[in-house]
Each structure stands twice: as structure tokens, then as C-alpha cells.
Image (tube, grey):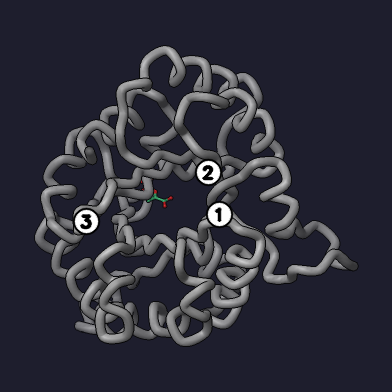
Amino acid sequence: MSRIAFVAGNWKMNGSLAKVDAFASEFKQTGADLSCDLAVCVPNVYLQRMIEGLDGSGVAVGAQNLSGETEPGAFTGEINGTMLGEIGCKYVIVGHSERRAMYGETDEIVVAKTKAAAAAGLQPIVCIGETLEQREADQTETVLATQLNAVLNGCSADELKDFVLAYEPVWAIGTGRSATPEQAQAVHAFLRAQIADRDATMADSIQIIYGGSVKPDNAAEIFSGKDVDGALVGGASLKVESFLDIARAAQ
Ligand code: PEP
């Protein structure tokens, strides 16, 4: 099966209304020729504005987090998947390493959020990745298998039908130090094989994207791995030009 490439931007806690407007209008002028799946995940307060700005551009919009709770209620400060879906979000990032490390998101929470995203009809972009210490201790595959299997065991096949897996080595995020194309391909092949052990059809169709210091100048070589289906892009997604260069390298 040939999978469509997917490039998603993660703005993290960056941006402003002016930057959202500039990104959307610049993208509409220059980015019409792309055939891969594209999304930008912006802070919640800018979601609606970005959705309106990118309307008709072919770029979807995603959130960076959601509540694991599906019912409305007394959860101050939280936003659920239904709310995100109502305003037109298509994707939501789940289990980014910054949320795992800084906000205590465990595999159990990641499973609850993945289920909540699916229940709301959102496509979860589930992030997994090892730290440098774990890689150096030769624990990469064990750590990734644990994180991945939590989601595969905790969710039904139906809940997983639209999920995207993002391999993001923690040591490569925001550091300028990307995984080599060989390292990325080896891990992606391992992850696809783990999924194939349970569901060969899902393994064939799932987009497994790489994240960690992807830039216009290293994107093409990272995407050369046959199991690397695109990228989750942090810093380089803030500017249309670099985001587009990466998207062009992916298709
Ligand atoms: C990320 O935020 O998921 C990420 C990969 O960031 P960067 O591209 O800046 O390393």
C-alpha cells in the first residue's frame, strides 16, 4: 500500500493573532500545489482563527492537547474533544513528550486522551519517544514498545482506525540534533512491525511520522526511509516557507 505523506506543524506555545493571520494568508498564496496531508496544531485560543484563515486551503487544523474526559463537567481549564470538533479541528496531538515530562502525562492518560479524541471524531497524533539516557542504555525499543502497546492494548480497533503515530526521540526535539535517516527508518520499521503483530492492515495503512528537529535542509533525507511517512514539525512550522519546503520534500 502506498501511504499519503503527512506533515503536521506543532506551534507549541508560540504565535499571536497577527502571526496566525499572516501564516494563513501566505499559505493560501503559495501552498496550493501540495498533495500530502497537512495540518497545523496551534494554541487553543488561535484554533478558530486559523481554521477560518485556512478555509479552502487544504490544510487542516489541530489542537495540541485535549481532556481525557468526554462528558462536560467540573474540569476547570480543560477542553474536550467534542468542543474541538465543534469548531472544526481535525487532529489533536496526544502525549507529546513535553506534556509527558512537564505535565505528568502517563501512558494511562495518553490512552484516555486517545480514546477521547476518537470518540469526538478527531484524529489523534499519538507521540512516543525515548530519552537520550534510554537510547544510550539500549532501551529504545523497550521504551517505545511499552508506550505504543499501552495505546494498542487500551483502545479498540475502531478507536484506532484514524490514529497517526509520531516517533519523536526526546533528545531530538528542539535541539537541532535530528535522528539520522537510518535511525529514524530503523525505529519506524520496528514500530510498524509491532503494529503488524496485531493488525497487518493497520500496519500497512497507518501514517508513522517522525519528529525532532526536522528542517528544510534535512527533511528529504529523513523522508527517504520507506517507513517514514512524514513529520511532526515544531520550530520550522512557524514560518510558511520552511513548513512548505518540508511538505514538498514529503510528497
Ligand atoms: C515537536 O515539537 O514535536 C518538534 C518535533 O519540535 P522541533 O521540530 O522544533 O524539534
Q: Amino acid at mark 3?
A: Val
Q: Is residue 48 left or right of residue 60?
A: right
Q: Residue 44, percent across and down? A: 67, 44
As measured in the structure, the alpha-carbon distance from the residue carrying label 1 to the one carrying label 3 is 20 Å
Label 1 Cα crowd, 10 Å radius (few <14 / some 14-19 / many 20+) = many
Q: Are marks 2 and 3 in contact (CB under 8 Å)?
A: no
- Please tell me the numbered disc located at residue 92: 1
Q: Residues within 10 Å of mark 3 (few under 14, many from 20)?
A: many
What's under tag 2, amino acid-wise? Cys
Callout 1 amino acid: Val
Q: Which mark is residue 249?
A: none
Q: Along the line of sight, which residue is nearer the eye, 90 or 167?
A: 90
Q: Quarter of the image containing the C terminus?
A: top left
> Circle 2 is placed at which residue position?
41
212 versus 45 height, above or below: below
Occupied quadrant, residue 204: bottom left
Answer with mark 2 or mark 1, whichever residue precedes in sequence: 2
| Measured Cα–Cα span from mark 2 to mark 3 | 20 Å
In terms of secondary structure, where does tag 3 sit? loop
Image coordinates for residue 227, horizontal then vertical, percent: 18, 61
